[in-house]
Image (cartoon, rainbow, N blue to C red):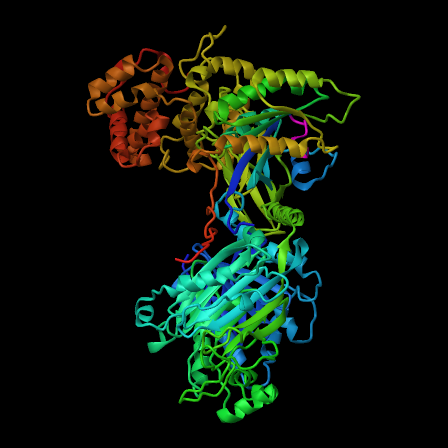
Amino acid sequence: MAKKTYDLLFKLLLIGDSGVGKTSILFRFSDDAFTSTFISTIGIDFKIKTVELRGKKIKLQIWDTAGQERFHTITTSYYRGAMGIMLVYDVTDERSFENIVKWLRNIDEHANEDVEKMILGNKCDIDGKRAVSKDRGDAIAREYGVPFLETSAKANTNIDKAFNDLATAILDKFAGKEPGDAPDRVMVDPRRGDTSRRSCC
Amino acid sequence: MSFNQDHLGIIQAKLSSGETASTCHEASLMQGCVCASRILALVEHEGEWALFIFISSRMPPEVFTDLAIERVIPIDNDFKCEIDAGEQSVDVYVNSRKLKLLFKMIPSIKTNNFVSEIMRSMEDLTKRRDPPPEFQWLHKYSGSSTSSRNKTDCESATTDITEDDASKEKMLDLDSPDIVVSRHSVAQGANPIAARENVIQHQMSLKENDYTYTQILRVFIGTWNVNGLPPTSSLTPWLASDMEPPDIYAVGFQELDLSKEAFLFNDTPREEEWRRSVIAALHPGANYKQVALVRLVGMMLILLVQEKHEKHVRNAAFETVGTGIMGKMGNKGGVAIRMEIHNTSMCFVNSHLAAHVEEFERRNQDYHDICSRLSFSKFSPPKVIDKHDQIYWLGDLNYRITEMEPRIVRDLISHNSLGALLECDQLNRQRSQKNVFSGYREGPITFKPTYKYDPGTDDWDSSEKNRAPAWCDRILWKGDGMDQKEYRSHPILRTSDHKPVSAMFESQVRVIDVVKYRRVHEEVLKKLDKLENEFLPQVTVDNTEIIFDVVRYLEAQSQELIIANTGQVPVQFGFIKKPDDSKFCKEWLNIDPAVSFIMPGEKCDVKLEVCVDKKSASKLNCGEDKLYDILVLHLEGGKDIFITVTGNYERSCFGSSIEALVHISVPVREISIGRLVELEKGEPPGGMEPYPIPKEIWFLVDHLYRHGLKKQNLFLLPGLNSELIAIRNWLDNGSSEPLPGSLHSIAEALLLLLESTAEPIVPFNLHSVCLGAASNYLQCKQIVMQELPEYRKNVFLYLCFFLQELLSHANENGLDAKTLATVFGGIFLRDPPRLSARGRGNLTAMDRKKASFVYHFLVNDLSDYVTSKVLHLGPTT
């Protein structure tokens, strides 16, 4: 119970086609809840959630983006500054999976070079309508060297793991680097006054 | 944003008569992890004090109506105020009954003054001899608080939260949504994280019981005045007389060394000698580690814990205070060691107070001096003795037995009548009068006085002074969960003229259950996250797709967008630029207001007005732009909402190029959009022989030629918008009716037609050449004849002919060549876009050059220019 431990702020971004479940994933992670009504995100919204990783308190600021095609030129401008990007497709929607390559290219063009990426195949609870096998997800992730998970915001499958994995990857990358190297990273008061003097003079 | 005592007057104006604001200060009220600006004021009314909390609609407030009283907290016996001063902020915790507030203030002298004023008002209360204050005067403020509950007693002034049992829950939910809060950008800055850390700690301390359990530790306290002598025998009978080994040892000595060297240089070999003999005599049943040792002249304190506890000891520190000669020297005073063991803080104080029978008041004073002057400075804020869960105070306190002959005292002792003697013990008397050691307890004394013996014996002092025996050496304690099991002296140790004293405590310490701690901690984090998310700005907009049906040139249309603040905090919104855009919306769109502020629960109507004018028409006409824009509505510190604006633009001759218009023989509306775009792109025209000038220009000029030559101020007065629209319709749709509108409107329509094109009559690439040649008519003439594109040259000359005709009627219409040259100079030689963005400094000089360029063509004979008959004015067909 250190008095002042230092905190980190990681900015994460959710991208992917409209309707793949980006908002649901965020809602599940931040509020531990799910609703099946679909409300298209018209804009950019964010939520915060604090996690503890490797003994550090990390504040995640997670940005949820509009997936609709017509907003793409605008949403790409939000990529810069993101330290991690979740690229989401819908396992019941072949097209959203095919677009992964396009989204990856978008990341290359607009995001920071060292951004951590992760591919999520969402809605994996729906077995009957599955259009994209887990193997195909694995394959494309391997091809681009990006971690991959199948998730379900509805069944709460792998949601926490996805965010924790992505945040851990960012944390590990910045470990050892000077704080200034990390964009958008906030350092607060390294612990002080915690070394006990054990003996007199 | 400065706030100072000058504002006291404003606050005073807010108060009723008889109430005096003595001091005020700005502070941030922590609501969850969001801080909100407040003004605090200390207000007095007939000797009663209260803390007023104000919300100000602006900071600093300018008039008293800017202020609203949020809460009034009476400074009564339930009022508590604790300060935690850090480098970046001073945290002031205000507690009153179940109300708990945390204010953050910027560290400054003003802050210190304000806080000490609060402390002073609390002291006033304790000194008060009158009956307890009733705070009748505060009743009237209970209505203005955030709570609407009816209360009848004094508590009404403290407003809400007071009745709820779940006080811990309430701390988190302090933030009632209707409280006005000025929002800070929660998500972005570094500050909120630091603020959060404090809030987390505060929350965790409130929930301590949920993640700690009690463990009992045996604490051995020993004190001995050794009269400056070295150890001569083993201390085992004193330190290891119990069966079970203590968990903690705190052993204090006084008069360790009475030599001059020790006094003057605070250096003595005795420290090490006595330390060794202590360590040699520790209980054999356990291994001990020294936590700290502190010595001031003859006062020494050594703290040890069993080895197994060592890793649970944190933040050990020691301090000394001298109260001896000059009130400063170390021959008297106190030394102290503090530590935290598990989650419990302990402080051990060894003091040697003033000597001599009659000096009990000096002893009291020494005690008070030690309490006020001893603070552990390595902490921020420094920790004083009283800020510990458990305090053990030991030492030669030097209190004697008064008003009794030494002979009688010895008699009573020999008859074992200690009770009568204890009644005359100065410490007992001073304590019962509450002059010293208030709040401390002492166990019953069952041992003989420990002073004064002939050294080496158990015999009372036989010297000439013949001192009466006394219980100089004492052990007291303060705190919860401390249970004294033994309190005794050890007469067998005969080195000194004092006998050593010891006490054994069974003390409860709070031990953290790591699993539970983590769970509680996680809950606190979760709750704060939830709060933080709830405190993000939230709005709904009634429509994210604004559709305008048909939009026509110069005809403004508007729609309203309703932005409702559905969140808990005021929202500052603004439309922001997209990347690569120079403005947050296209030039044909106007947003009012583009930036504003909405209070929770309120709405803001934003007017979106589409108007295609001379600047935007050409791009829409040629298909370069569409009536389509995505606006980014940004909430300060929050999300962005995209709003799409679309419409259908009805193309017009206004905005069409001269080159396109000369190829169109029918009204513009009668040809297809595709054809129009093709013509604008310069696609080869098919079929018809182009007109020398656009028919629209001809219609307008012809009308002015026939009806307006004698009109005063033509081209100088504006037309009417409605007439301009009628003229536009007439030109675009064609009509058998005569051209509508007044002469001024028709003149302006002509100017607008020329101004709405993508390029002016003089192409942008000739702009600077023309200005350079402006003083030379022949050069100007050469440029016009050789450089201007054919149709634009036609229009240029045609209009100059017409203007010369107008000037020939100057005595009727009052126009002059210079004025017209200035008007048409600006139109023929419209600035290229990049130029108009430049500084305005050179503009008048440039305007003069443009005018002089055109002037040549208004005053010189143009008859030899004319090659085409069509350019002649007058009704030709």
Quarter of the figure with residue B758: top left
Residue at position x 50%, y 66% in the image: B234
Q: Is residue B284 above or below residue B551?
A: below
Q: Is residue B636 above or below residue A193?
A: above
Q: Point out residue B657 in the picture as x, y percentages from the top left corner.
A: 44, 19
Residue B4 visible? The answer is no
- Nearest the camera: B811 or B478? B478
Q: Is residue A23 magenta?
A: yes
Q: Point out residue B434 in the picture as x, y percentages from the top left corner.
A: 54, 82
Q: Quadrant of the C terminus of chain A?
A: bottom left
Residue B538 visible? The answer is yes
Residue at position x 42%, y 21% in the image: B698
Give the magenta-colored segment's residue range.
A18-24
Quarter of the figure with residue B736: top right
Q: Is residue B18 above or below residue B731?
A: below
- Nearest the camera: B208 or B35? B208
Q: Residue furthest top?
A: B687
Q: Image check: A64 left or right of B107?
A: right
Q: Image check: B681 left or right of B778?
A: right
Q: Point out residue B581 in the picture as x, y percentages from the top left corner.
A: 46, 30
Count how many numbered circles sit on residues in the image.
0
